[in-house]
Image (cartoon, rainbow, N blue to C red):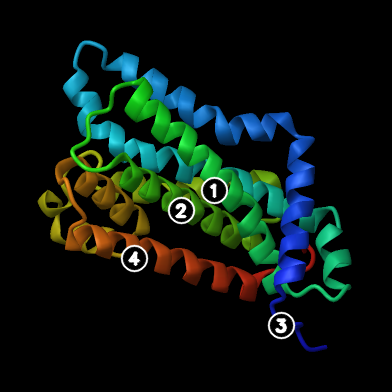
């Protein structure tokens, strides 16, 4: 049976269904929207005696926290669709894998917009995060990072057989990026092999983009590069996720 082509109408309908389900799941909403804000608030007061440290790493974590939460929630939510048989019933209808993936990406992307607005607003105007560039550029990178987390979550859900396995993918997919993204030490000061690995990890460009906004008043060439890499990675991962999506869990 041939795969139906991507349909905007089916994609929007899928996204609306996902958002209706999430509306009845306050714990997931709290994890997506409130936990990143609470983590930033905690971080600010951990460094209460050293506000410069918060300024140095706050922008980077503003992008990292949304990626992690979106990855976790999206991977588990997509897996539930497959283990419950919902995905198999949906794909028996005129709904292609691309419609399903795009619909989920649209739904969680909508939540990513809200999440990014909340975290960026709290960091810049509530917690006094000092950035040289425009807060709107900071918001853009935070949003792209959250969407990237959504894409990665959709992708890894195809390889998990249970929610526990979905969570186990976090050390394999997220933690190496966290260690090599330049948050703890500049990437050009790492061992050459590790620096080369970090150059192909999307979180590295999220942190670089945040640092560009923090240090420069305008849009730099490096910032444009970082944004394009994040967009390209998200689209690539979504495409691969659609190709590898399974109807049911073995």
What residue is pinned by disc 4?
229
User: Which tag, 2 or 4, sits closer to the chain's start?
Assistant: 2
What residue is pinned by disc 1?
71
Q: Is residue 45 left or right of residue 152?
A: left
In x, y percent, where is residue 250? 77, 64
What residue is pinned by disc 3?
5
In contact (CB < 8 Å): disc 1 and disc 2: yes
Q: Secondary structure at mark 1?
A: helix
Marks 4 and 1 sit apart, C-alpha to C-alpha, by: 18 Å
- Quarter the N terminus occupies: bottom right
Q: Secondary structure at mark 4?
A: helix
User: Which tag, 2 or 3, sits closer to the chain's start?
Assistant: 3
Q: Secondary structure at mark 2?
A: helix
User: Which tag, 1 or 2, sits closer to the chain's start?
Assistant: 1
- For the residue pair 65 and 119, the one nearer the viewer reads as 119
Quarter of the view holding residue 123 = top left
Residue 246 in view: no
Numbered circle sitting on residue 2: none
Specify few, some or many for label 3: CA neighbours under 10 Å numbering under 14, 14-19, or 20 or more: few
79 over 128 or under it: above or below: below
What residue is pinned by disc 2?
173
185 over 16 or under it: above or below: above
User: Which tag, 1 or 3, sits closer to the chain's start?
Assistant: 3
Marks 2 and 4 sit apart, C-alpha to C-alpha, by: 18 Å
157 over 95 or under it: above or below: above
Marks 1 and 3 sit apart, C-alpha to C-alpha, by: 26 Å
Q: Secondary structure at mark 3?
A: loop
Marks 1 and 2 sit apart, C-alpha to C-alpha, by: 10 Å
Specify few, some or many for label 1: CA neighbours under 10 Å numbering under 14, 14-19, or 20 or more: many
Quarter of the view holding residue 81 = bottom right
């Amino acid at each position: 049976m041939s795969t139906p082509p991507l349909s905007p109408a089916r994609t929007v309908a899928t996204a609306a269904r996902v958002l209706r389900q999430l509306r009845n799941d306050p714990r997931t909403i709290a994890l997506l929207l409130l936990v990143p804000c609470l983590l930033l608030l905690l971080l600010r007061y951990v460094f209460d005696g050293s506000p410069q440290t918060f300024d140095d790493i706050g922008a980077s974590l503003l992008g990292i926290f949304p990626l992690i939460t979106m990855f976790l929630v999206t991977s588990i939510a997509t897996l539930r669709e497959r283990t419950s048989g919902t995905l198999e019933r949906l794909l028996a209808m005129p709904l292609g894998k691309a419609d399903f993936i795009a619909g989920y990406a649209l739904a969680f992307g909508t939540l990513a917009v809200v999440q990014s607005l909340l975290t960026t607003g709290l960091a810049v105007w509530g917690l006094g995060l000092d950035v040289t560039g425009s807060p709107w550029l900071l918001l853009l990178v935070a949003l792209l990072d959250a969407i990237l987390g959504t894409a990665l979550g959709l992708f890894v859900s195809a390889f998990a057989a249970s929610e526990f396995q979905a969570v186990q993918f976090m050390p394999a997919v997220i933690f190496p990026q966290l260690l090599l993204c330049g948050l703890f030490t500049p990437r050009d000061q790492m061992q050459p092999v590790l620096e080369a690995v970090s150059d192909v990890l999307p979180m590295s460009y999220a942190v670089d983009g945040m640092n560009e906004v923090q240090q420069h008043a305008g849009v730099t060439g490096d910032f444009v590069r970082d944004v394009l890499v994040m967009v390209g990675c998200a689209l690539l991962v979504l495409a691969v996720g659609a190709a590898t999506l399974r109807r049911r869990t073995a």
